[in-house]
């Protein structure tokens, strides 16, 4: 789930944006599949894990598969505040049934190692103008909210010979690149909108182009919910999946969640339902101050003088209006 305790986080983000990306509460990608644009923070290690029930049915090939899927993802911030390494591991154990035979499949279905870097942050060194005379002016709609945070991701899929879930032509691709562009918007009312556009298994016969869009809403200091849509398109497989779920913040470093996912087609039809946890350790984290560019003293002085004149003029108008 993207940025739990949203109201608090947005406040901290807007008014303390000269500091690093570390937040007071855990920033987990669970239970959705999309990645948020922000890193966990330098020296911070974060574990995101979940257990899911998996059901797969193919009407044309006439097979069924049911079992359990286990996700174990590790995120670590290093070198810079904007950079993190991500190791994603998915293990599945299911029973595959056809008219001719039944077999048990188990093994690492997917393993991906990647790196994410925050490229652009529209709130960095940005100061929201404050109108001391109007509450309405300070809370009105602002176009700046539509400028997204942007990150880039590069990684590699690691396939192993013991993987029983690969297509035959994938067995020759032990290593395949993955690239992704991530955007994120934070809107008033504790809303967060995340978009991932990716190219997976680059250069292989199963190369796919896809997207994930996730809308998250914070309902309270502990509860949040999300809706998500994922689409993939390739020569061998194309699909669309829809997910929804919720997360509960137990404390600043620990979150629990639950979700449900269903696709729209029956070749094959997928159903996933599960729960998970997210935990982080930030004991070694130290606040990093990102220096803002120096301001032009003459412009600042001129601006300050104009503001004083406006304030004085407004005060005179108020005094004249008094009976």
Image (spheres, helix red, strand yellow):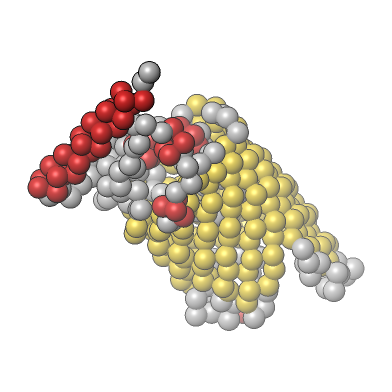
Report how many numbered discs are placed on residues in the image: 0
In which quadrant will I find the N terminus?
top right
Q: Which residue occupies 59% across, 77% down?
A: 206
Q: Which residue occupies 70% across, 56% down?
A: 242
Asked whether, in this view, residue 124 is left or right of residue 305, the answer is right
Q: Position of residue 222 (x, y in %)?
A: 56, 29
Q: Position of residue 231 (x, y in %)?
A: 64, 66
Q: Nearer the viewer, residue 195 or 312?
A: 312
Q: Quadrant of residue 161?
A: bottom right
Q: Is residue 79 above or below residue 113?
A: above
Q: Quadrant of residue 285?
A: top left
Q: Can residue 277 be spotted in the picture?
A: no
Q: Position of residue 265 (x, y in %)?
A: 78, 66
Q: Nearer the viewer, residue 56 or 248?
A: 248
Q: Nearer the viewer, residue 161 or 205?
A: 205
In which quadrant will I find the C terminus?
top left
Residue at the extreme front:
323
Q: Position of residue 267 (x, y in %)?
A: 79, 70
Q: Which residue occupies 74% across, 56% down?
A: 262
Q: Which residue occupies 52% across, 54% down?
A: 194
Residue at the extreme left:
298
Q: Nearer the viewer, residue 45 or 26?
A: 26
Asked whether, in this view, residue 244 is left or right of residue 249, the answer is right
Q: Can residue 212 be spotted in the picture?
A: yes
Q: Is residue 5 above or below residue 35?
A: above
Q: Is residue 82 above or below residue 252?
A: below
Residue at the extreme right:
99
Asked whether, in this view, residue 131 is left or right of residue 109, the answer is left
């Amino acid at each position: 789930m993207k940025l739990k305790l949203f109201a608090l986080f947005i406040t901290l983000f807007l008014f303390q944006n000269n500091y690093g990306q570390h937040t007071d509460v855990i920033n987990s990608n669970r239970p959705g599949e999309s990645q948020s644009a922000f890193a966990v923070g330098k020296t911070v290690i974060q574990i995101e894990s979940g257990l899911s029930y998996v059901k797969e049915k193919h009407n044309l090939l006439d097979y069924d598969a049911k079992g359990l899927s286990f996700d174990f993802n590790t995120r670590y911030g290093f070198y810079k505040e904007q950079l993190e390494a991500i190791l994603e591991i998915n293990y599945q154990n299911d029973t595959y049934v056809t008219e001719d035979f039944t077999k048990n499949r188990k093994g690492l279905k997917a393993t991906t190692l990647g790196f994410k870097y925050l490229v652009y942050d529209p709130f960095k060194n940005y100061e929201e103008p404050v109108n001391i005379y109007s509450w309405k002016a300070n809370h009105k709609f602002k176009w700046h909210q539509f400028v997204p945070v942007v990150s880039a991701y590069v990684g590699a899929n690691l396939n192993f010979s013991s993987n029983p879930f690969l297509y035959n032509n994938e067995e020759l691709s032990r290593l395949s690149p993955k690239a992704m562009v991530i955007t994120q918007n934070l809107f008033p009312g504790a809303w967060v909108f995340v978009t991932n556009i990716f190219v997976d298994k680059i250069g292989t016969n199963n190369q796919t182009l896809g997207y994930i869009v996730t809308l998250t809403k914070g309902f309270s200091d502990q509860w949040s919910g999300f809706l998500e849509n994922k689409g993939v398109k390739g020569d061998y497989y194309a699909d669309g999946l829809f997910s929804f779920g919720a997360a509960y913040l137990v404390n600043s470093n620990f979150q629990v969640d639950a979700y449900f996912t269903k696709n729209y087609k029956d070749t094959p039809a997928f159903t996933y339902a599960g729960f998970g946890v997210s935990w982080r350790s930030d004991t070694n984290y130290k606040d990093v101050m990102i220096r803002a560019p120096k301001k032009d003293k003459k412009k600042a002085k001129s601006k300050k003088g104009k503001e004083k004149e406006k304030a004085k003029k407004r005060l005179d108008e108020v005094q004249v209006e008094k009976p």
